[in-house]
Amino acid sequence: MSRLLYTLDLQTIEEFLNKALTIGSGQMPIKYSYDNRELVVNNIKLVFDYNIRFVKEVNTIVIVLLEVPYNVKYLNNVFGVSSEGKIKWRIRKAIDDHSIKNPLPYENLMVHGENVFVTDFYGRRFSVNPINGKLISSDIAK
């Protein structure tokens, strides 16, 4: 009796699990790629004002965080893009939804399951509705 021995790295296991979860949910992953300021979603190219820092997929939305230069006042630098390559939303203003003083561009984008979070330079963390870009809640990340 012979046994086959497989060695899998963490990335391979993660990719396998992501595919299994996607197949189980009946949802196909969105085909996208990005470089500098350009995002291509299902062969449709979008060009943003600034370079793309992070891209995450949540359900049928590709969430894009732009890298805003330090000396530029460009707030609300998170966008939701549909699988058809259309911008569905731009993140709501923190000052409007949560009375935040001295708003800053977002620096980080995190996704845990279907929960989306963004943080700014001051460590203020916001939960974002991935369907419409509205801010759900806020706290301080430590």
Image (spheres, rainbow, N blue to C red):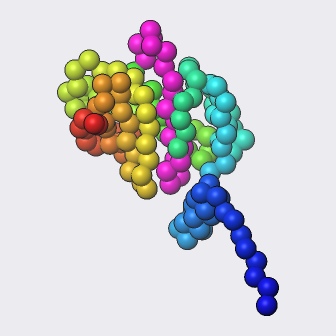
Residue depicted at x 55% and y 39%: 55
Residue 24, located in which quarter of the rendered image? Answer: bottom right
Up-down relation of residue 13 to residue 141 (above or below): below
In the rendered image of this protein, does residue 16 appear above or below residue 96? below
Left or right of residue 72: residue 124 = left
Which residue is rendered at x = 30% and y = 25% of the image?
122
Q: Is residue 88 visible?
A: no
32 to the left or right of 57 = right
Depth check: 70 or 39 in front? 70
Q: Farthest residue in the right direction?
A: 2
Image side of residue 89 versus residue 31, left or right: left
Give x and y (percent) for residue 107: 42, 28
Image coordinates of residue 9 in percent, x first then y, are: 64, 58
Locate the N terminus and report the quarter of the image it occupies. Answer: bottom right
Question: Residue 69 appears at what percent x and percent y?
Answer: 49, 15
Residue 47 at x, y percent in the picture: 63, 26
Observer-nearest residue: 107 or 13?
Answer: 13
Of residues 62 and 126, the one nearer the viewer is 126
Q: Residue at x 23, y 38 (%)?
A: 139
> Total number of numbered labels?
0
For the C terminus, give its image quadrant: top left
Furthest toward the left, the residue is 99
Q: Quadrant of residue 141?
A: top left
Residue 131 belongs to the span the image colors magenta:
no
Q: Which residues are magenta?
A: 57-74
Q: Is residue 69 visible?
A: yes
Rendered view: 137 above or below 7? above
Give the residue furthest to the top.
71
Q: Along the line of sight, which residue is nearer the eye, 133 or 77?
A: 77
